[in-house]
Image: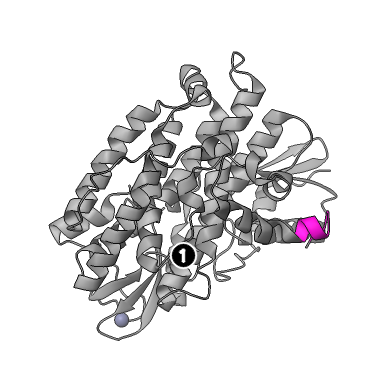
Amino acid sequence: MVALDLDRQTLFDWLLRLGDNALILGHRTSEWCGHGPALEEDIALANTALDLIGHCQMWYTLAAEVEGKGRTADNLAYLRDAIQFKNVKLVELPNGDIGQTMMREFLFNAFHFELLTALTGSTDPKVSEIAAKAVKEVAYQLDRASDLVVRLGDGTEESHRRMQAALDYLWPYVGEMFLADATDDALAEAGIAPRLTDIQTKWEAIVSDTLDEATLTRPDRRPDVHTGGKQGRHTEHLGYILAEMQFLQRAYPGAEW
Amino acid sequence: MVTPTQEIWDWLAEVPDPEIPVVSVTELGIIREVAWDGDTLKVAITPTYSGCPATSVIDLMVEEKLREKGVQNIALERRLSPPWTTDWVAQSARDKLREYGIAPPIDGTASDGRMGRAARLSGHNLTIPCPRCASGNTDKVSQFGSTPCKAAYVCRDCLEPFDYFKCH
Ligand SMILES: [Zn+2]
């Protein structure tokens, strides 16, 4: 049972943000399959992508149930256009090199881990069930991503240079994760979701410890330059992802394995 | 007449995990409940990992087994809560995993997102004994191995690579 004082559309939009972040980052991560710099990294990235796609399935199933219009999780993944996707811009950016990929995974995982941890205490039992399932997997993802950020940041001169460049490039996108709008405020008031400022404080602690250990410098620039993804305003990159991901269902509507 | 649920648990113990066929789905702890609702048999199954591709195969294998035993009406439930943990992996399965070449989970060592950092700072890594030669002189190659539930390790004594069934 979801909180009654919250309208369905608001809850639906918020669930889409969770599902869309997981699907789009899962899809990006899956692009490494067969291209990883080492067999073990290739396999690890494919496993991470699987986790994320599993999470999006759970969030979309709940979102579709909340919406109550007969749509399925698959419909939400394959039959929406870019403007209806509510993921943060950070997750749709192209992978870049493996350093940039791992830096993005780290910056997002730290947020994802703290958000899911908080959501295990949600007043909505279905939200807390999904969060409790997902957070156990994201803990391993965060462990792996921070380990690689440290090893590459505090690695060779070349790997350090690339990790710093990745951090500088991604930094203006990280602020969007913590930028609360009316949807986030309504969810926090209903006790379903935490205040994003609380998540930011916890994220800052993980990020600052890890960057210190990685000998990387926190960029001296605004983190909230590129925003709007949560409201459906995306970079040009999302359209290309959807074109590839949704092709089959668009070309052969209703096709099944 | 309905079959006693204990007998149904015995039937399900014959269903192997599709990815690690030496252990059964009951030993893995993923069958959460077996109960009759009138003449419908309800079986609650929990996924190991959210994205585990074996989940739908397991549903199919459970259903096939029950049909083979003559159960007509079956309702499978996907149960998320409480989330699956390796604490539910039976001792019998742990021994079978080791014989099969997979190091069984070490309870109480699930990641909290900061495990790697604690290990780096303290210099103490989790010791995973090699399932082949029992040496503790092993190294983690990757946090994610051949499936999401395993990590990849290598033994520095017998030089063999092996999988570790991660604590979860
Ligand atoms: Zn050995």
In-front residue for pair A87/B139: A87
In-front residue for pair A219/B38: A219
Q: Residue furthest left?
A: B122
* Residue shown at 60% from the left, 43% from the top: A58
* Residue shown at 78% from the left, 31% from the top: A69
**Figure disc tally:** 1
Position of residue A134 measured from the top left corner of the image (x, y, whole percent): 49, 45
Quadrant housing the N terminus of chain A: top right
From where the camera sits, is residue A214 visible? yes
Q: Quadrant of residue B58?
A: bottom right
- B129 displayed left or right of A136: left
Where A234 sits versus B103, above or below?
A: above
The span picked out in magenta is: A248-256
Q: Quadrant of residue A172?
A: top left
Please check the rendered image and state whether residue B163 is part of the magenta-colored stretch, yes or no: no
In the rendered image, which residue does mark 1 sit on?
A45
In-front residue for pair A9/B116: A9
Kind of residue indicated by mark 1? Leu
* Residue shown at 40% from the left, 48% from the top: A108
Q: Residue furthest top?
A: A5
Position of residue B77 measured from the top left corner of the image (x, y, whole percent): 69, 43
Q: Residue furthest bottom?
A: B158
Where B126 sits versus A77, above or below?
A: below
**Ligand 1 picture quarter:** bottom left
